[in-house]
C-alpha cells in the first residue's frame, strides 16, 4: 500500500489521480492533499478519501475548511504545504500544482528524499539542471506524468544513451492547428480553451494553443533524459494516440500508444517501479482508422522555436520564460492581451531579465520574484490559475 501526497488535488491532474486511487484502493492510500483555495472541492475529497492532512495555500480558506472537517489536520500557507513533504509516512508525492509555484515543492520533496511523480513540468523547465542533480545525489526517482515523457521514460529503459538517434515528442497541435495565422488575431479565451482532444486546466490548455506547452516539454525532456536539444524533434499527431517515439541509431522507431487519457500515465507513475493491472479500458487498436503526422508550423507558432532557443541558452532564462508565459496568459484571460501578441509579450519579458549562466535555486526564485514584482503580482496566489 503506497501512501500518497497530492499537491494540486483539485486540478485536472489531481482529480484524475484521485480517480485512479479510488479504483485501486488496495494499492494506494491518500495521506495528504494540498490546494490553493478551492476548499469546496477539497472538502468533498476529504470526505471521500480521509487523508490525515490537508493544506491550503490561502490562509482564510484554510480557516474556513477547519470549521467544516473533522479528523484531518488542516495546514496553511506555503509553509503548511512544505511541511507535508516532511511526513515520514509518505511514500510518494504527486506534484500537480500548476505553474512556477510548483518548483519549491519539487525541490523540497527531493531534499526530503521523497519520490516525486511529476506533472508540474515547470519544475524541470525552470531548474532542470539543479533538480536532476539533486535527485541523483539524493537517489530520488522523478517519475514523469506528462504523457509524452511517461512514454519516453518507458521507451528509453530499453536502450543505452549512445543507441539513441533522436526522440520524437508528439503534439496534438491544439485547437488552432487548422486555423490560418491571420485568424489567430481575433482568438478569444473561449476559443483557446476548446482543446480538440485533452481536457486539462485552463493555463496548460492555452499553452497548448500557443504550442509553448510543447516548447516546455522539449526543455523538460532535455533535463529528464539528459538528451541534447538537437536530438529532440516535435511532430504533430492530432489523434494523440502515440504519446512519443524514439529512433535508435539502427533506424528503428519505437512508439508508445494508449488512449488520450491522463489516467494511464498517472497510474504508471503511481505504481513505478512495479506494473499494476489497469482497471481502465485499454486502447482497441482495431478501432484506430488513422494515425496522421505533420511538421509543426513554426511561423504560426513561434513560441515553439523560441522555447528551443531559450532552452539551449539555459541559465535562468527558461525560468524567465515560464514566469513570462504565466503573466502573458493571465493578461490574455483578462482580455488585456491579444492571443497573437502573447509571443511578443513573453519575448519582451524574457529579454528584460539579467542573464545568469549557472544559477543556483535561489537565483531561480529571485528571477521569478523579480518578474512577478515588476508585474505587480506580489504573491504566488495572485496569479489566478
Ligand atoms: N491537465 C493535464 O492533462 C496535464 C497534462 C500534462 C501535464 N500537466 C501539468 O500538470 C500540472 C497541473 O495542471 P492541471 O491542468 O492539472 O492544472 P489545474 O487544473 O489548473 O490545477 C492546478 C492545481 O494546482 C493548485 N494550485 C495552483 N496554484 C497553487 C499554489 N500556488 N499552491 C498550491 N496549489 C496550487 C490548484 O488549486 P485550486 O483548485 O485551489 O486553485 C489546483 O489544485 C501543470 O504543470 C501542467 O503543465 C497537466
Image (cartoon, rainbow, N blue to C red):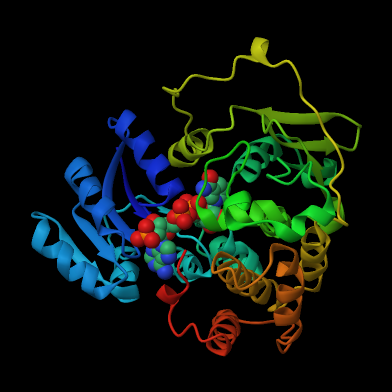
* Residue 23 location (% of width, % of height): 33, 29
* Residue at 59% across, 57% down: 189
Q: How many marks?
A: 0
Q: On the rendered image, what quadrant is the N terminus found in?
A: top left
Side (left or right) of 122 relative to 217:
left
* Residue 328 location (% of width, % of height): 63, 71
Image vertical order of residue 116 relative to residue 57, above or below: above
Side (left or right) of 76 relative to 145:
left
Image vertical order of residue 226 relative to residue 341, above or below: above
* Residue 181 location (% of width, % of height): 83, 54
Q: Is residue 194 visible?
A: yes
Q: Which picture quadrant has residue 149? A: top right
338 or 61: nearer the viewer = 338
* Residue 285 location (% of width, % of height): 66, 14
252 or 259: nearer the viewer = 259
Side (left or right) of 314 relative to 285:
right
Q: Is residue 119 visible?
A: no
* Residue at 48% across, 19% down: 281
Residue, far top: 286
Q: Which picture quadrant has residue 305? A: bottom right
Q: Which picture quadrant has residue 279? A: top left
85 or 112: nearer the viewer = 85
* Residue at 43% across, 76% down: 382
Amino acid at each position: 500500500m503506497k501512501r500518497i501526497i497530492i499537491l494540486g488535488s483539485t486540478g485536472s491532474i489531481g482529480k484524475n489521480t484521485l480517480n485512479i486511487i479510488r479504483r485501486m484502493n488496495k494499492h494506494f492510500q491518500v495521506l495528504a492533499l494540498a490546494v490553493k483555495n478551492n476548499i469546496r472541492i477539497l472538502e468533498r475529497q476529504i470526505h471521500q478519501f480521509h487523508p490525515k492532512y490537508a493544506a491550503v495555500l490561502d490562509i482564510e480558506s484554510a480557516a474556513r475548511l477547519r470549521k467544516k472537517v473533522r479528523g484531518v489536520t488542516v495546514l496553511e500557507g506555503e509553509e503548511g504545504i512544505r511541511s507535508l513533504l516532511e511526513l515520514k509516512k509518505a511514500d510518494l508525492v504527486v506534484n500537480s500544482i500548476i505553474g512556477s509555484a510548483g518548483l519549491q515543492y519539487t525541490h523540497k520533496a527531493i531534499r526530503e528524499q521523497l519520490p516525486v511523480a511529476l506533472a508540474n513540468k515547470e519544475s524541470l523547465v525552470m531548474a532542470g539542471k539543479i533538480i536532476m542533480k539533486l535527485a541523483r545525489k539524493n537517489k530520488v526517482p522523478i517519475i514523469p506524468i506528462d504523457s509524452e515523457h511517461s512514454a519516453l521514460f518507458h521507451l528509453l529503459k530499453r536502450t543505452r544513451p549512445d543507441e539513441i538517434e533522436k526522440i520524437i515528442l508528439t503534439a496534438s497541435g491544439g485547437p488552432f492547428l487548422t486555423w490560418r495565422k491571420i485568424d489567430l488575431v481575433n482568438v478569444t479565451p473561449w476559443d483557446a480553451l476548446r482543446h480538440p482532444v485533452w481536457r486539462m486546466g485552463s493555463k496548460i490548455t492555452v499553452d497548448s494553443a500557443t504550442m509553448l506547452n510543447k516548447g516546455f516539454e522539449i526543455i523538460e525532456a532535455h533535463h529528464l533524459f539528459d538528451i541534447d536539444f538537437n536530438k529532440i524533434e516535435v511532430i504533430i499527431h492530432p489523434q494523440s494516440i502515440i504519446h512519443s517515439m524514439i529512433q535508435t541509431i539502427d533506424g528503428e522507431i519505437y512508439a508508445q500508444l494508449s488512449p488520450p487519457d491522463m489516467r494511464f500515465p498517472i497510474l504508471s507513475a503511481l505504481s513505478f517501479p512495479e506494473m499494476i493491472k489497469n482497471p481502465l479500458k485499454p486502447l482497441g487498436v482495431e478501432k484506430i482508422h488513422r494515425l496522421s503526422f505533420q511538421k509543426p508550423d513554426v511561423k504560426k507558432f513561434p513560441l515553439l522555436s523560441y522555447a528551443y532557443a531559450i532552452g539551449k541558452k539555459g541559465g535562468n532564462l527558461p525560468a524567465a520564460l515560464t514566469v513570462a508565459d504565466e503573466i502573458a496568459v493571465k493578461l490574455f484571460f483578462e482580455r488585456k492581451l491579444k492571443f497573437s501578441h502573447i509571443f511578443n509579450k513573453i519575448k519582451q519579458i524574457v529579454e528584460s531579465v539579467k542573464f545568469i549562466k549557472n544559477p543556483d535555486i535561489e537565483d531561480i526564485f529571485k528571477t521569478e520574484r523579480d518578474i512577478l514584482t515588476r508585474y505587480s503580482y506580489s504573491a504566488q496566489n495572485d496569479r489566478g490559475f
